[in-house]
Every structure is written in C-alpha cells, then in structure tokens.
C-alpha cells in the first residue's frame, strides 16, 4: 500500500516557505520567544543560491552530525579537551565546526553536554556563534536522544515524561501528543531543535535487547497512532521529530550496537507489522526518519544493512512511501553498520543509498575525507550532495534556525521544568501504571495495618530522570504518602547473603515492595521474590523496566508495571500502591508463558483496577 500522491504533494509543499532572510556569516539576531513564530527564511530558490555559494568541503561538512565533548563550545574542561583531541583531533566544539563545517551536533550526557538548562542554552548559543562567525556560516542543527523513559539525555530539572511503552499502556493519543509538545517546548528553549524520537518500532519480540520499552507496544495500529500523535506534539513546538528505526527494529534478539541483526519478516509481514507506524509518521508530516543497521532480506537480498540499502531507503522509503524529508543514519559507530564495510566506505554507501545526514561516525576525519574523495573521484556527484543539503536546509528553515538561531536564559526559565509541565507528567504517568496481578485484593496497601514497608530490589544505573536509586525513590515517595518506608538495595543479581539480609529485614515490616529488572530464567531475582513470599508478608512486585518479568514470577501476589525507573513513573507507582489513584494502564504487549511461549499469560489490553 502506498501513500497517496496528495500526501506526497502536501509534504513537499510543507518544505517550502517564504519570508525574511538572515545575512549568513554576519551577526545573527537573538531569539526572543515573545516575538512568536520566526519568519520563514524563503523558498527553495534562495536555499539553492546558498548551496551554490558553498565550497565542496563546506557541502561535505553539512552532511555530518557529530558528537563533541564539553559543556562549553570554546572553554570545556581539560578532560573533555583531551577526549576531543583523542577522538576527533580538535579541542573544542568551535574548532570542530571550523575544521569540518559540520551541519549538526548531537548532545550526550556522557559527553558532558547537558549539565543544567542554562549551561545547555549557553552551549547551543556558543555553537551557533562559532558557525555563524565563519564565512558563509550556517546555523547548526543541534540534536539529541530525548525519548524519555529509559533514554533521556537531558535530565532534571527538565521535565522527564513517561517513555514510549508507558504511553502505550496509557493508550491516549492526546497524552502522547501532550508529552511530545512538552518535551519539544523544553528542548527548543535549550537550543536543541532535532529530537531522535519517537521510536516507531513495533516490539513483537519480548527478548528484544535494544528496543523493548522504547517502543509504544506490539500492536502496529496502536503504535502508529501514538507515533503520529508524538510527531504532531514535537513539531508543533518547532522541534523536528525523528521516527526510528526504519524499516523497523522491533523483532530482533540482537542489539545493533554490538551485532548485525537480521529481520526475517516477509514483505507481507513487513507491510502489516513494521510499516504502519512509519506510514503514520509520514502522513503526520515527520521532519526526519532514522535508519536501522539491520538486514531485511525480504526488502533487500544483498545482505547490506538498511542504512546502506538503496532498495530500502530510496526504493521503499522515498518512492513507495513518498517521503521527501530528511533521512538520518543511526550512529555510524555501531557494529551493525560496520560489520560488512570499513569506516571509509560506510558514509559513501549511505549517501548512495539515499541518506541525508551521517550521524556520529567513529572517526569524523576518515568519514569526511571519504565523502570528499568520493566526489572528487566521481563515485558521488556534487549534485547528489546538493540534494541532501537542500533537504537539511529546508528543515533548518522550517524550524526557524536560519533566522533566529539563538536562545535566552529567560526563555529557558519560562519553559523548562515549569509546574504545568511537571504536573502533566505526573498525571500521564498515573494513567500509564499497569496493575497486572492483584491476588486477594492485596493492593492498595493500608496505611494502618501495613504502615511499615520495606522496599527492596534492583537498582540499575539511573537514567537522567532519576534522583537516586529506584528503591530509595520509591521508599521516599511512599513515606510522603503516609507509610514508614525503608529502602534496601539488593541489585539486579542478588547473592544468597543479600537475599538473606532482605528476608531478615522483611521480618520487621508489614509489607514488602520488590523492584524487579529484566528477570530471566536464571536470574537470582526469582529467588529473592520466592523467599520474600515465603515469609508470609504481603509482597508487591514492581517491574521497573520490562513488563515481561511477571512470566518468571508465577506465584507473585501483586504486580505493577511502570516501564521505567525514572522518578515520574516511580512516584506514580507509589500513589497506586497507596490507593491515592487507581491504576489505569493496559499492557501494550503480550506476556508469554516462560515455559511455553505459545501460551499467552496476559494479552495486549490486560490491566486491573480498583
């Protein structure tokens, strides 16, 4: 099934604009949020004139989106200077831009780009000044992975929202759109104008190690509706949404960061399972689509990853689905795209396949020079580069970057982590929390007869939205709700001694809450839960990541799924445990029997309340 010609014409029309222009390379005006939406930069004719005035080296640079270490564009810490020199051969973001004229920069928390809101805004402004101060300088498209849930690069005090599978359990397209709008407004205020979200993969494999709760669920139509809603929310806030990972990464047991997944769907299965969310994103006017480093033989029998596949990116995405927006690769440092070709060939082959933005190569110098050489030697034409640069400039224009690239501290303070956003996040999380099991109506706990609560369990590495270990956050939230709760971290693989300590502590409690994390058949978390149940104390299990844990815990008395261990979801779980709110979430995925995967324990849509 193809999108209609009307849809394609509408998408093409949306890339054009008219209005005032920025004198590129000169002094850019500061963004004033009170001025309303920025004027459009102009139509394709003006953008083509910009491209015609660029050198070949500048054109090559515009195709790359690169990481860089440091909290400042010009004065990072010494450790970040050392990291930049070792990995990129430059000292700072400003030097990166001057040497390679990159069109985009991606922020990571581990690269120390996202310490606090004002610092992020200053970094964004410093990057724009560095680029616009060059001859023929263009604004930089700053991006990040702010999926929310378990993947968030910008942490508190920004608003952290429920992630995709939590929104799938919520089921409300309105809430998904609101979450996108809130996230978009805050990212925009920070100078981040491209978000690599939403995930459009349909998670049909419970063992999927890389997607899982990053997906909205296992029902293609439900996922499609939520993807479209989030696209609308982000892009109404003037932040480019990015549907990922095309052509669909939801049915694999291999993580493409470390291996080369093969998706064995037939073409008919791809049309039915994987394609609907991407079709919905395109109908919603998605600004960018990210590729997957996966092999799909039914779509391209060559053995190439989709990122390097012309039949997939040009034949299906461009020609069949009618998409003419920006296509960005997943990180070129991932093993899935490096399995078959060297780092010098990957960027060239990606461009030949139909890609527009080359994301985060392991060596920018190798990749940049490879593309440059490919043009000079005739493997790539300059016209091919111009096609991609035009798409990127259209996007920058549509986002207002070409006219107003800067942000202000006042704009940050008006948008980031404000009370209205935080309150909305709490309400959305409450509607996402899913009660899967509630034997003998164990929940809600009584603040009279079950006042003393022991919170034990897994404390995985904290995502950006968590102020502390999940056990401590959950215990603190229950204490605020009138319980006397204490926390005891038992980890993701508790030893016999740790389990014995938890069992002894349970003897002093009226009830026990256990946080579980990715429980497998060999996980010692199973023994922890079993021995706590043997104490006779009421035991409530809270799955703080995958909802599939319950399949490994057949005797559990009460079981909640939160889909992440960020504060907003843990606080919502505490309110459900305390009976302050009723659970309203419904499983967006099937939970299969651990011993017989042909048996469905809990179907899509299962969820209890009280």
Image (cartoon, rainbow, N blue to C red):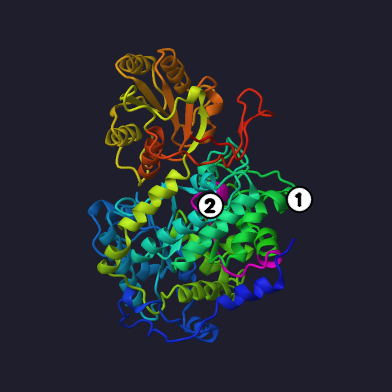
Q: Is residue 292 left or right of residue 69?
A: right
Q: Nearer the viewer, residue 558 or 545?
A: 558
Question: Badge 1: how crowded within 10 Å, few (<14), some, or many (20+)?
Answer: few
Decide: is 274 above or below 490. Answer: below
Decide: is 455 above or below 393. Answer: above
Decide: is 439 above or below 50. Answer: above
Rendering quarter of residue 595: top right
What residue lies at 71% left-to-right and 73% top-to-bottom?
5
Can I make out residue 290 in this image?
no
Q: Earlier in the sequence, mark 2 or mark 1?
A: 2
Task: Please give the range of residues in magenta.
Answer: 318-338
Could you tell me which quadrant the N terminus lies in?
A: bottom right
- The residue to which callout 2 is attached is 172
Measured from the top left, where is residue 484 in percent x and y? 27, 27
Measured from the top left, where is residue 131 in percent x and y? 35, 73
What residue lies at 61% left-to-right and 36% top-to-bottom?
590
């Amino acid at each position: 099934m193809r999108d209609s010609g009307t849809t394609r014409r509408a998408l093409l029309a949306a890339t054009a604009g008219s209005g005032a222009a920025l004198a590129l390379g000169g002094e850019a005006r500061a963004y004033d949020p009170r001025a309303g939406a920025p004027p459009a930069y102009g139509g394709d004719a003006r953008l083509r004139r910009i491209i015609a005035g660029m050198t070949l080296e500048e054109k090559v640079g515009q195709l790359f989106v690169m990481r860089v270490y440091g909290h400042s564009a010009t004065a990072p810490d010494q450790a970040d200077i050392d990291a930049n020199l070792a990995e990129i051969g430059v000292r700072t973001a400003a030097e990166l831009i001057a040497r390679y004229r990159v069109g985009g920069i991606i922020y990571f928390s581990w690269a120390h780009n996202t310490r606090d809101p004002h610092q992020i805004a200053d970094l964004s402004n410093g990057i724009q000044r560095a680029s616009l101060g060059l001859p023929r300088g263009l604004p930089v498209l700053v991006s990040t992975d702010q999926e929310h849930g378990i993947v968030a690069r910008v942490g508190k005090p920004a608003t952290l929202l429920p992630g995709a599978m939590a929104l799938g359990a919520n089921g409300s397209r309105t809430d998904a759109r609101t979450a996108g709008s809130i996230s978009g407004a805050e990212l925009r205020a920070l100078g981040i104008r491209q978000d690599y979200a939403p995930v459009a993969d349909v998670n049909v494999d419970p063992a999927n190690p890389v997607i899982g709760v990053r997906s909205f669920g296992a029902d293609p139509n439900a996922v499609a509706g939520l993807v479209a809603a989030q696209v609308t929310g982000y892009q109404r806030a003037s932040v480019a949404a990015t549907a990922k990972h095309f052509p669909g990464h939801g049915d694999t047991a291999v993580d493409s960061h470390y291996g080369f997944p093969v998706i064995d769907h037939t073409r008919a299965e791809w049309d039915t399972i994987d394609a609907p969310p991407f079709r919905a994103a395109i109908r919603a006017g998605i600004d960018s689509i990210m590729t997957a480093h996966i092999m799909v033989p039914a779509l391209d029998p060559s053995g190439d990853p989709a990122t390097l596949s012309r039949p997939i990116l040009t034949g299906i995405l461009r020609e069949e689905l009618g998409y003419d927006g920006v296509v960005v690769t997943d990180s070129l440092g991932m093993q899935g795209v490096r399995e078959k070709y060297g780092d010098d060939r990957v960027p060239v082959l990606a461009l030949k396949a139909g890609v527009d933005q080359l994301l985060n190569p392991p060596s920018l110098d190798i990749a940049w020079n490879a593309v440059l050489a490919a043009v000079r030697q005739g493997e790539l034409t300059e016209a091919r580069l111009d096609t991609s640069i035009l798409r990127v400039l259209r996007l920058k224009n549509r986002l207002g970057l070409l006219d107003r690239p800067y942000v202000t501290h006042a704009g940050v303070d008006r948008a980031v982590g404000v009370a209205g956003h935080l309150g909305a996040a709490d309400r959305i999380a409450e509607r996402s929390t899913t009660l899967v099991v509630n034997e003998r109506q164990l929940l809600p706990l009584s603040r009279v007869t079950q006042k003393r609560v022991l919170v034990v369990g897994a404390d995985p590495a904290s995502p950006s939205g968590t102020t502390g270990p999940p056990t401590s956050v959950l215990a603190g939230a229950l204490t605020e709700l009138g319980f006397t709760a204490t926390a005891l971290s038992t980890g993701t693989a508790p030893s016999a001694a740790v389990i014995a300590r938890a069992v002894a502590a349970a003897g002093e409690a009226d009830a026990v809450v256990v946080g579980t994390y990715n429980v497998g058949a060999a996980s010692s978390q199973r023994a922890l839960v079993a021995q706590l149940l043997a104490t006779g104390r009421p035991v409530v299990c809270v799955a703080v990541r995958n909802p599939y844990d319950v399949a490994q815990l057949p005797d559990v008395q009460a079981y909640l799924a939160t889909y992440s261990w960020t504060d907003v979801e843990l606080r919502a779980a505490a309110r459900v445990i305390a009976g302050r709110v009723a659970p309203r979430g419904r499983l967006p995925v099937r939970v299969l029997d651990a011993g017989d995967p042909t048996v469905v324990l809990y179907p899509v849509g299962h969820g209890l309340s009280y």
